[in-house]
Amino acid sequence: MESARARSAALEAAEDLFYSRGIQAVGMDEIRAASGVSLKRLYALFPSKSALVRACLEARDTRWRARLAAYVDSRPGPPQDRVLAVFDWLHAWFSEPGFRGCAFINSFGELGATDASVADVTRLHKDAFRAYVTGLVVAAGRPEESALAYVLLAEGAIVTAAVSGTPEPAHHAGRAAAQLLADTAVT
């Protein structure tokens, strides 16, 4: 199996298993079996389980942020609608089969205190999300310092949807964001 294909197969299998069952519950032998990549090749590609977890999170970050941006960029209308599109996208994500919350929060909860690389990649993801939402809020004519409120609404919706098992927190947070946009309208 060529190296790029083996890496891709290992990442896909590991990410699916980690997200559905948790990182600590999944062994490297299970990833080998699910990916079809030999254990020797798996360890050649990822010298440790920690390295594999980090690579999975980095790949997920790139994909997750690209999907969000593509959805928001496709939203017609004024810049305020792009802020609200974040919450519409969250609802669609929460509605996907197998949704188990934020992989970064889940990973941080499992390993953040003992694996600095997981904590680091989680912080980078959350910082990038915050920067993205801040750009949308500023483009909508709202003060930069108000952006954290929108981020907290989104992050709270993510956790609440995972715990409650329903996508509705995205709609609740979206309505709160719409009210916040109306309350902070530039006159």
Image (cartoon, rainbow, N blue to C red):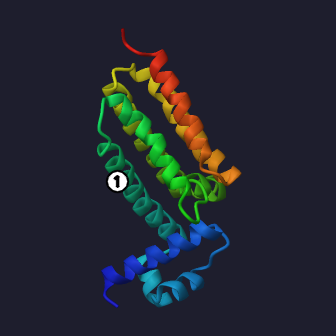
Residue that numbered label 1 is attached to: 66
Q: Picture coordinates of residue 173 (x, y %)?
A: 56, 35
Q: Give the image location of residue 131, x and y in percent.
A: 39, 36
Question: Which is nearer the eye, 162 or 81?
Answer: 81
Please report the residue visible at 64 percent of the width from the left and 67 percent of the height from the top: 22
**Residue 33 visible to an observer of this rendering:** yes
x 62%, y 79%: residue: 27
Q: Is residue 38 above or below residue 95?
A: below
Corner quadrant of residue 128: top left
In the displayed structure, would residue 119 be above or below residue 151? below
Provide the secondary structure element on which disc 1 rests. Answer: helix
Q: Please give left or right for residue 166 compared with residue 181 in the image.
A: right
How far from the left and from the top, in percent, is residue 135?
Answer: 34, 32
For badge 1, the amino acid type reads: Ala
Residue found 30% across the figure and 44% down from its top = 73
Residue drawn 47% across the image and 91% down it: 38
Please say whether residue 122 is visible from this viewpoint: no
Furthest residue toward right: 164
Q: Where does the C terminus fall, quadrant-wise?
A: top left
Q: How many marks?
A: 1
Is 86 on the left-hand or right-hand side of 94?
Answer: left
Quadrant of image for the N terminus: bottom left
